[in-house]
Amino acid sequence: MSESGGSAAPSVTSRLIGNAWRMKRSSIPAPYSNFVASLVLVKGDRIWVGYRCDMQVTPLTGKFGADVSDIDISQPLSAHELSELREAFAEYSVLAIREQDLTIDSFEAFALQLGNFGETPFITPVDGHPNVLRLLREADEAGPLFGSGWHSDWSFQGQPPSATLLYGVDIPPAGGDTAFTQQEQAYDALSDGMKELLEPLHGVHSARRSYGPSGTFGQRDDRRSMEIIGDESALETRSHPLIRTHPDTGRRSLFINEVYTIGIEELHHAEASAILNFLFEHCRRIDFTCRVRWQQGTLTMWDNRCVQHYAIDDYFGHRREMMRVTLAGETPQ
């Protein structure tokens, strides 16, 4: 069929919208700039446009995590493209979106297409951007690494974040990967007896070990590139079910982590410690994990409701700078 038209539309199209159509290639309307036009059907002043998404999703492991390419998130996404991205996120829980060129404004704009910003305690945000954190570690910086230890972001909040988005601004030539562990898989691997034991129990979460007065980041340290200010509010606790149900997928997962989960509400300390120590070890089994190798321009997003993560400290002598936002979540159920 020529671009000037004259031939009948393909049969599948004919069945949908009739035979009396002229088909031509056309420039892509601005709202669909991340799509390739498959066809444009024109009759008088009425136009039907068919598009296919060129986004490529490549699994990182056989179970979860994926690289995403051939998508430009620096521009507003169409409804269809957002739908494809959400579908991939629901399936893989961790998406590493490669080869992006984001400013702080376009980073925020992309995040807001996915949800509202979550609250960010204890860490001073970027000037003029109260929801964006600058995660910076200079080449010669020593001391504890922010984000080390297996954890789910801000699980001590009443409504922990649904997701975290992290964008690579300045990346070491090697090292600085982020590891992830899938807690739906961790739950599925438990025995029926253990699931029954955990079902009615609630984990006690607190920021005290990280941001309390005697915590890892509890005191101001001018040698740190990041301004982290702990306070007494870190001593507060919140209780969440040890087993939660994902509000979008209905899948069940463990919801504990070794950084912020300090006890089990219904049990004595010794009893809770025994169970939690078992679960912490169980959750980081190698077959539940994947690892994202960062590149400049990679944006990685992960689902805090069913994934833990760990920042790997193996790049001393090299600078690493990231931008981070969290998306608001719901009360775990």
Image (cartoon, rainbow, N blue to C red):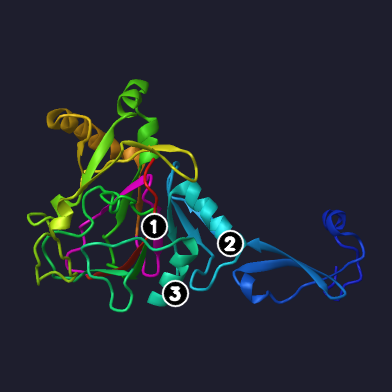
Left or right for 232, reference 74? left
Return the disc, 3 or 1, that comes first in the chain's sequence. Answer: 3
Q: Position of residue 302 (x, y in %)?
A: 39, 54
Tell me the kind of residue under disc 2.
Glu
Q: Nearer the viewer, mark 3 or mark 1?
A: 1
Q: Nearer the viewer, residue 98 or 235?
A: 235
Find residue 104 and report its image quarter.
bottom left
Q: Secondary structure at mark 2?
A: helix
Return the disc, 2 or 3, that comes first in the chain's sequence. Answer: 2
Q: Position of residue 264 (x, y in %)?
A: 22, 35
Circles 1 and 2: CB atoms closer than 8 Å: no
Residue 45 appears in the rendering: yes
Tell me the kind of residue under disc 1.
Ala
Residue at screen point 26% across, 60% down: 176
Residue 55 appears in the rendering: no
Residue at screen point 50% across, 43% down: 249
Q: CA distance from mark 3 to mark 1?
A: 19 Å
Q: Which residue matches tag 1?
A: 328
Q: Which residue matches tag 3?
A: 106
Crowd rating for badge 2 (residues with CA inside 10 Å; few <14, some 14–19, many 20+) = some
Crowd rating for badge 3 (residues with CA inside 10 Å; few <14, some 14–19, many 20+) = some
Q: Secondary structure at mark 1?
A: loop
Left or right for 55, reference 268? right
Residues rendered magenta in the picture: 294-318
Crowd rating for badge 1 (residues with CA inside 10 Å; few <14, some 14–19, many 20+) = some
Q: Which of the image's four quarters has the C terminus?
A: top left
Residue 239 among those drawn in magenta: no
Q: Which of the image's four quarters has the N terminus?
A: bottom right
Q: In this picture, is 124 found above or below 274? A: below
Q: Nearer the viewer, mark 1 or mark 2?
A: 1
